[in-house]
Amino acid sequence: MPTYVARVRDSQGRSRTEKFSAESLAQARTNLRDQGFVVQELKQSQSFSFDMKKFQTSMVKVSVKDKAVFSRQFAALTNAGVAIVRSLGVLSEQCSNPKLKAALIEISGDVQTGTNLSDAMRKHPQCFDNLYVSMVQAGEIGGVLDEVLNRLAKLLEDVARLQNQIKAALSYPVVVGFLATAIFVGMTVFLIPIFANIFKEIGVELPALTQFLMTCSEILRSWWSLVIIAAIMAFMFAYKQYYKTRVGKETIDRLSLKMPLFGDLIQKSAVARFSRTFGALTRSGVPILTCLEIVRDTSGNQVVANAIDAARAEIQQGGMISIALQKEAVFPAMAIQMMSIGEETGELDAMLMKVADFYEDEVEQAVKALTSVLEPLMIVVLGGMVGTILLAMYLPMFKVFEKLG
């Protein structure tokens, strides 16, 4: 529990300094007022103390599923007429995620002091992003907070389902690739040296494939293996640093959209995420320009973000979203046409939801197709690696048999 230092004035008008512990800054201020003090200055103590619980909480992430469950429960309580502060208190007590629990406690304290719910949530970007805060703010202004929370829950549930589908497509090749690499390294390091000693004692001439694998075995068992590991780590570090730059992010994201097998999946998932998020924001009453700004930041792909930026600039000049997106040649023609119809009929949000439904189904089908292609491909790769090592070990046997004959 954090420690706070306060300069207060008591009932007799005398100033004094108080040092005490409280759950949050808002709770500390409330405790002082309950004791009859007038708070002149309040801040957290800067004395160094390692808080293991706080460190563990900082390492926890708030998942999309956590936010979806919270939104659904919060909407149910709000719709039932329960006060926001009481709702937050009830949800914080039963919240299993420690980071979200701590955030809800602080948000509840801020709301008690008169802060708007959206402003209180904005102080916790690791739990509630701009998309969430903007929709809550729109719900507060329009007096339909429970309806907006239900839309948020539906949006987050759809996002979580889409993420799970993509993870399912990527998990299989990652796991099989890791196993194939581990098997190859294990056989190269432990199995090949045994055969190498046998062939050396016999004095047989080794085929090129066997010599190559023995050289790999010697490298992996020497200090050169550390050089290889260091080079891989340096490459990964350089890649991450390059991806942090705008040029690097745009280049890599553009290449990812052109990747065989995965490029189509990435594009469809980006279109589905854009349509679902944009539709939910516009339906909740968030201004179009603000919607595009939020969707740009949550797109996950710099090429898509650039296209959304162009659409935002087009709208500022009185243009149409569909025309601007069509110029960038990032979104599929069918999605552009449906958005154009939505703009013409004044039902853009409904049309965006239909686009999202369509492309989420397309992602599901693409995941199934990708998995069906990758499964036999990875099996062939794994079998080929093991078979290559066994072939390299058995080829010299023919030389041995000739020598014995």
Image: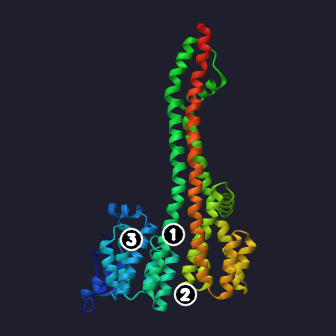
* Kind of residue at badge 1: Val
Disc 3 target residue: 100
Secondary structure under badge 1?
helix
Closer mark to the observer between disc 1 and disc 3? 1
Closer mark to the observer between disc 1 and disc 2? 1
Quarter the N terminus occupies: bottom left
Residue at the (49%, 33%) spot, across then down: 186
CA gap, disc 1 to disc 2? 20 Å
Residue 23 appears in the rendering? no
| Crowd rating for badge 1 (residues with CA inside 10 Å; few <14, some 14–19, many 20+) | many
The outermost residue toward the right is 327
CA gap, disc 1 to disc 3? 19 Å
> For residue 312, which numbered disc appears in the image?
none
Q: Horizontal and vertical percent for residue 221?
A: 52, 30
Residue at the (57%, 22%) spot, across then down: 394
* Kind of residue at badge 2: Gly
- Check contact, mark 2 vs mark 3: CB within 8 A: no
CA gap, disc 2 to disc 3? 26 Å
Disc 2 target residue: 285
Judge by depth and name the residue closer to the eye, 373 or 50. 373
Judge by depth and name the residue closer to the eye, 300 or 34. 300
First-in-chain label (1 vs 2): 1
Disc 1 target residue: 159
Q: Quadrant of residue 87?
A: bottom left
Give the left or right position of residue 74, taking residue 404 as reference: left
Quarter the C terminus occupies: top right
Give the left or right position of residue 301, taking residue 135 as reference: right
